[in-house]
Amino acid sequence: MEVPIGFLAMLWSFLSFLPFFFLLLTLGLLKGSLIAPLVVGIIVFGNSAVIIGLWPAHFLWTYYCVTKTKRLGLVVKVLALISLPLPLLLWPILAIVGSLLGGLGYGFFAPLVATFEAVGETTTDKFFYCFIDGCWSTINGSCTVVRDFTDFCFHSYFSYMDELREHVPPNEKPVDIKLSKLPSCLLVIVLGVPLDVLLITIVALWKSPYMLLKGWKRLLEDLIGREGPFLETVCVPFAGLAIILWPIAVVVAVISAIISSLVLGFYAGVIVHQEDSLWLGLAYIVSVVSLFEEYVNDLLYLREGSCLPRPNYRRNMNPPDGDRNDRKNESEDSYNSKLLLERSKTLKFTIQQYKPMQVWDWLFKSCEENSQMLLREGLIDVNDIGECIVKGNCKKLSVKLPAWSIFQCLLASAKSNSSGLVISDEIELTKNNWPRDKVLEWFIGPLLIMKEQIKGLQLDENEEGCLKKLVMDYKNEKPEEWDDAGFPSKDNVRRAQLQAIIRRLQGIVTSLSRIPTFRRRFTGLVKMLYMEAVQSGVLANQVVNSSNSERGHGNEGPSDCGHGKDSRSSGENSEHEAHGIGDIV
């Protein structure tokens, strides 16, 4: 669509869109008012049932795991046991209130936004979809929210507690603090929390008008001039909605700043313990306010730096580092500004192209493709699927399978000499385009290091072909485990390096598996894998082969990397699990 040029053209474009906008707004508000109560009921009732039902188990199991853990020292353990009742008692209240507010916001705004999205250029029957879009999808989404919350409370929580109770390696020291430092830490926390909350709140409130006005100015310029994200026809009505909702975004930003100030205030005690200095802890209380203001200035494209004092709170903190960081932030800000000016996407397209979701979708798509291949090769069999669905033992499918998929990505990236990660034929994640998300940065950063390690090892084709079996069937704790696997290299140092990479990948995947959406999507992956085994005849063949093996000569000798894994169970167990899986699926 042509962009209006000149004042009169811009004015006519603005006036002509107002009736269209108010009609969509009225319809969206009506849909939101009708859908929101139902969504709130589903989310609040479902989450409350999970919270209240599991709260006694959470309370008792948390105390048990903290008491039994070897990862915490005596002083930290005693402090944790004394302070645990408060968060455990507040958890049901805060969770239910959060469910109420979240359900209200989701149930009201999702249909409202979907109404504006329905007038997209790709939509054929705009009038029909303006009434339909956002109704059933929002209700279905509320059920998904309850399911993900249940997965978090039931599976993710107990997974964290199990990790807390694991044996500590001999070279790992438990987390503890010295009693001599405890009074100083508590004193700084008592001073830092109220001061930082007060000062950061003042800064946030002082900067909020700038955020409100600069946001409105940018949105109005894009609306009237048809630039930036509002170049397309679908985004013209959505521009008005964004202008109306912008004050809510400002209020949410201020509330987030106030909540984060609590954590920043508590961190002053960590500074005192790490630096063994009360003075440096007090310096941190002052410095963190300056750092917060500088962050806000960078976010709002105001003047660089901060006018507030910033004393050093680390012994090894050098002033030149701050200058280098300022220059780095300046270059990143200019790059981000250019990206904002060049963007021309609808809201729906932007959500689909959200980079963290792309990485998440790639991981499960890669797991789906690799699982089908491993199933045909015998590295995944009916016993693995049965243990996962019937017995809940999913380590091979939920940890080793994603680890192998990521390992393949690292191999492809190392071969292509990519500066980032090649996650598909069309997508390459680099420092310029990967997600600006802390969780994804924590995930991608170690992968880049492991990619360089793999590149330095210079694996040949025989070694690459053998790694598939080694990742899926071996514990990879000692180099000697690979002696009977047919791995070409006999160099124990080379083997140990590869095993360290595999173990680290499995650790990353274990952490990712605790994200609620992981379990929901993984359940779909297991069901798809079972259906693939049934349709392709692999399930029946493996049951027959297991029965023949039971009547034959027993277990065979170890196989090399070019063959599937050995049969490890009897035909009776395989048939029993096959029937059990079929009944569940």
Image (cartoon, helix red, strand yellow):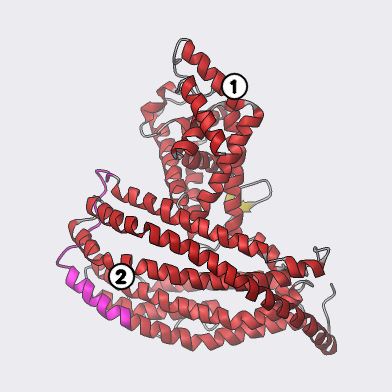
Q: Which mark is residue 423?
A: none
Residue 530 or residue 162, whichever sits in front: 530
Give the amino acid at mark 2: Arg
Q: Residue at x 37, y 85 (%)?
A: 198
Kindly tell me whether residue 127 is visible in this rendering: yes
- Evaluate whether residue 418 shows in this view: no
What residue is disc 2 on?
A: 314
Q: Residue at x 66, y 82 (%)?
A: 243
Frontmost of labels 1 and 2 is 1
Q: Is residue 65 left or right of residue 212?
A: left
544 is higher (above) or lower (below) than 181: above
Find the distance from the CA under tag 1 to the CA under tag 2.
64 Å
Q: Are marks 1 and 2 in contact (CB under 8 Å)?
A: no
Q: Which residues are magenta?
A: 167-194
Residue 541's label in the rendered image is 1
State yes or no: residue 171 in magenta.
Answer: yes
Which mark is first along the chain, 2 or 1? Answer: 2
At which x and y percent is residue 103? Answer: 54, 69
Amino acid type, mark 1:
Asn
Quarter of the figure that contains the C terminus: top right
579 falls in the magenta region: no
The image shows residue 115 at horizontal and vertical percentages of 72, 71
**Image x and y of residue 297, in percent:** 51, 80
Identify the secondary structure beneath mark 2: loop
Count of numbered marks: 2
Left or right of 424 in this view: 153:
left
Secondary structure of the residue carrying tag 1 is helix
**Name of the residue lying farthest toward the top:** 553
